[in-house]
Amino acid sequence: MVRTLSDLRPVYVVGVGWHRYQNPSETPYVSLGLAAIREALTDAKIEWPAVESSYVATALLGMAAGRPMLRHLGTTGAPLVHIENASASGSTAFRQACIEVAGGISDVALAVGVDKRNPVQRSNTGIDHLADDAIVPFTHFALLTNEYAARYNASVEDIALVAVKNHRNGAKNPNAQRQQERTLQEVLGGKKVSGALTSLQCTPIGEGAAAVIVASDEGIRRYGINPDRAIRVTASVGRSERIYPPGVGFDAALTRETAELALAEAKRQPKDLDVIELHDAFTVEELHYIESIGLCPEGDGVQMLKDGALDIGGRCAINPSGGLIAMGHPIGPTGIGQIGEITKQLRGEAGERQHPHARVGMAHMVGVGAVCYVHIMEGRR
Amino acid sequence: MSTDKLLKSNIYSFGSGGPRGSAPVLLGGQCRCGYVFFPMQAYGCEQCGNHGDALTPCELSTGGTLLAEAVVHLHADKNRPAPFTIVKVALDDGPVVRSVLAEDSAAVSPGQRMTARLVPVRSGESGETVLDLRFTAAI
């Protein structure tokens, strides 16, 4: 890397919006996306023609889905690009929008994620495997759950507590797909999926949309945006998987590397983080990632969870939105929705979910293990 | 003369003991840089990027140590009716592989020594027995 985002001019999140994440429905993606974008424009108090560039994150809608959606906001001719990066599609679109504004190409840019639950298509690499058709993502994470439990002497009940916390947070989020508190008994007693994983410990893939608008100081001045509600992006890092020693999980190792770079870029320590939105598609991931980010030594995540240190109001609120487990994971929107949640938390506008005195937030996504994106944001308060 | 046929003869083969007599071998590769991988491919080394004659085929033992197991309760693909068990094995020769546990294997947990064998999975078009590789607890 020749330069990091923090070497360029400051970039801020100035508007956030959603269409609720929900079970698959007949609603066209165009409606989902437009609802999120219009809410973000209203939040920033700007009009569509102010947006100089758009990044549309979607993994499951097929080719060039953005134009049939954005055309209904009015004709501007502004550039548009589509980003597919698996689960990290939204995070990647956000990073590119930030880079464009920080680099001085645009003063106001949009990152919007929208998806419907369509079949995942992956091209044949020409390399065969022993039984890849038998190993879907939840089985990958069931294996990691078994490995974590054996290595750190954690119980199935301990790991399932992640789901109890995240359903509790999601129950307070009007944009969450799952808005119901669940007891440990309900989580453990649900439908068995793979290994120790039950359905309430797995993300419900649904549909929805999330949008954020980013702006430079110049953009904030030009459009009269309230600077007190602007949240600065102080680090943006993307990395991809490399080769790790046997027994080292690539998901956790890749997160460790990416989070370290992001913390260095923001000149922050793990202890400075007040809120984190991270990729908890399956319960064990949250433990792996808080340890990889450096909140505690490896294997100590369960104790933090039991102590309430990861709750809203605890030492560092993890997934106050409900995370992928409760808020949901419609793929394209997910990483952008995380940025929206961190923005609300750092503005002090998160309502019932507000983590007290939140000043520094982190958003983290992985995509099929192969890519990892971490952003750090800081309020002006 | 054997009437056994391998489901994936491109990535494993009969061991030296004959069709069902001994553990099968995995058809892996090694790069000039020392990196050992499975299965064999000629696209390029994942460690150093070398390709062409830097990559040579080599047979890997199925002996290894279990890293993790998971009983799969739900699986959409009708060709793989659940339940079945997936195992993640660190091979003694280097690579980490994931595959299906033999139905008649003893129960396994992390740290267990593992091996593999070929088991009949169905009958082929000409009546031959089709074999696929399954991991199993080593005795």
Image (cartoon, coloured by chain):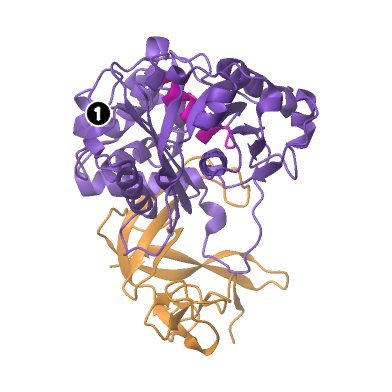
Give me the residue at 41% from left, 10% from top.
A351
Is most of the magenta stretch helix, strand or loop?
A: helix
Residue A328 visible in rendering: no
Give me the residue at 57% from left, 47% from top.
A85
Q: Residue furthest bottom?
A: B53
Colour assigned to chain B in the rendering is orange
Judging from the image, what secondary structure is the residue with disc 1 in?
Answer: helix
Quadrant location of the C terminus of chain A in the rendered image: top left
**Kind of residue at disc 1:** Leu
Establish if B127 lies above or below A376.
below
Q: Which residue is mark 1?
A: A305
Q: Is residue A74 magenta?
A: no
Q: Residue furthest top?
A: A352
Residue A128 in which image quadrant: bottom right
Q: Closest to the observer: A180 or B44?
A: B44
Answer left or right for B125 relative to A358: right
Q: Closest to the observer: B119 or A82?
A: A82
**In the rendered structure, which segment of residues is drawn in magenta?**
A326-344
Establish if A367 lies above or below A355.
below
